[in-house]
Image (cartoon, rainbow, N blue to C red):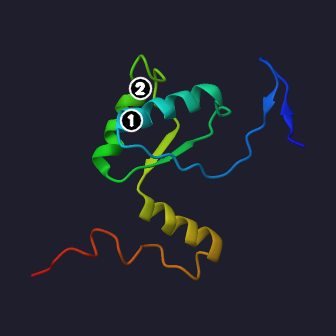
Amino acid sequence: MEKMRKGRGPAEPMLVPGLSVIHANHIEDLRQVAVAWIRRRPLRPLENELFLVQSNGMAQWLKLALAENDGCGIAACGDIGLPARFLWHAYRAVLGQEAISGESPYEKGRLTWRP
């Protein structure tokens, strides 16, 4: 049986922590989904929402888009990162910091051509 949350509004199913993968062909559609998600299930104070995007440019765009007036109005306490960096930190958290080095061998600085 699904747990129900009672509070300000009608009882609705509790959100179990986890990973949600949402994809679309248009970035504006993804922004609308993100804004609706944040408004429907706000986090507690000082908790961070994590978004993974495919590029640094998309991360900047998402920060600005979430802060617009028709969005959330503010873009604080949101971590927007790249999937490779997220996975590397997850490996370190699960396998231990002693087993995995602090810097990924696939970091941008390591993969640049050197004369």
Residue depicted at 50% across the width and 34% down the height: 34
Q: Residue at x 41, y 16 (%)?
A: 69
Residue 98, by quadrant, is bottom right
Q: Is residue 78 left or right of residue 113?
A: right
Pinpoint residue 100: horizontal percent, then vertical percent. Answer: 53, 79
Give the label on residue 26, or none: none
Work out which residue is located at the far front of the displayed protein and give it: 25
Q: SS at mark 1?
A: helix
Q: CA distance from mark 2 to mark 1?
A: 6 Å
Residue that lies at the very extreme toward the right in this rendered image: 1
Residue 18 higher or lower than 69, as above or below: below
Query: Which residue is tagged 1?
Result: 63
Position of the C terminus, as image quadrant, is bottom left
Looking at the rendered image, the quarter that the N terminus falls into is top right
Type of amino acid under label 1:
Lys
Reading the image, the residue beneath label 2 is 67
Which x, y percent locates residue 28? 36, 32
